[in-house]
Structure formats: structure tokens, C-alpha cells
Image (cartoon, grey):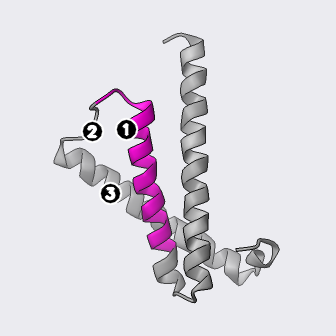
Amino acid sequence: MPIKSHAHSVFIVSFIGFFAACVNWSIFGMLHSLDLSMHISVPVAYIVAAILNYLLCIMVLFRHQARWDSITEILVYAVVVISICMIDLICTKVCIRWDFLQYIQI
């Protein structure tokens, strides 16, 4: 792959990740403002963003028709998403405990 192609891929991956993060934060903000439990709002927001991230990567970044067809690959993806979702929940709890969210309008 030429360097230009790598740079383009890095840009696309970064944009997709940023967009998914914005969706995650927006959904969390909406659910949090509805006084839903953090144990519901954080995982729901993260999982929706992870699904969006996967779909955008399939549509924009990866080869056409490159969807996973192996149960093992899907399970690995699910384990990674669930693991990082737990980390996201812990980080959000810490931010709320430290009153970090007062500096951010959600």
C-alpha cells in the first residue's frame, strides 16, 4: 500500500472513531438527562456507538462485502466491545465522582 493510501486510511479510521465517540457522548447525555441509571445509559450509548462504528467501517473502510461470517470473529468482537464497555463505565463513574461533568454541558 502506498503511503498516501495509509494516510487516507488513518484519516478515515480517525474520523469514524471521532464520529462514533460523538454519538456515544450524545446518547449518554440524552439518557443521563432523563435520569436513567448510569449502569444503563453508559452501556447503551457505548454499544450503539460500537455498532455504528462497525457499520461505518464496513461501508466506508473495508473491502466491499467484507462482513464477518465466522462465529469466532463475531464473538471476539463482542468480547472486545463488552470489555471496553466495562472500562467506559468505570471511567464515567470516576468522572462523575470527581464532578468532571460540571465542566461539560450534556
Q: Is mark 3 on a helix, strand or loop?
A: helix
Residue at figure coordinates x 35%, y 26% from the top left: 63
**Do residues under tags 3 and 2 come within 8 Å of each other at their CB atoms?**
no
State which quadrant residue 92 falls in.
bottom right
Q: In this view, does 14 lie above or below 90?
A: above
Q: Are marks 2 and 1 in contact (CB under 8 Å)?
A: yes
Q: Residue 91, labelled with which disc? A: none
Range drawn in magenta: 42-64
Asked if residue 28 is positioned above or below residue 77 in the image, the reply reads: below
Q: Nearer the viewer, mark 3 or mark 2?
A: 2
Q: Is residue 36 above or below residue 73?
A: below
- Residue tagged by mark 2? 67
Residue lying farthest to the right in this orientation: 103
- Which of the 4 image quadrants contains residue 23? bottom right
Q: In which quarter of the image is the C terminus?
A: bottom right
* Residue type, numbered disc 2: Arg
Give the percent coordinates (x, y) of residue 57.
Answer: 43, 39
Q: Specify the principal SS of the magenta part.
A: helix
Amino acid carrying mark 1 in the image: Ile
Residue that badge 1 annotates: 58
Which residue has dot 3 on it?
78
Q: In this view, does 2 lie above or below 65?
A: above
Q: Check whether the beta carbons of the residues at disc 1 and disc 3 lie within 8 A of each other.
A: no
Residues 41 and 76: in front is 41
Spatial distance from mark 2 to mark 1, Cα to Cα? 7 Å
- Amino acid at dot 3: Ala
Q: Residue drawn at (61%, 65%), measured in percent from left and top?
A: 25
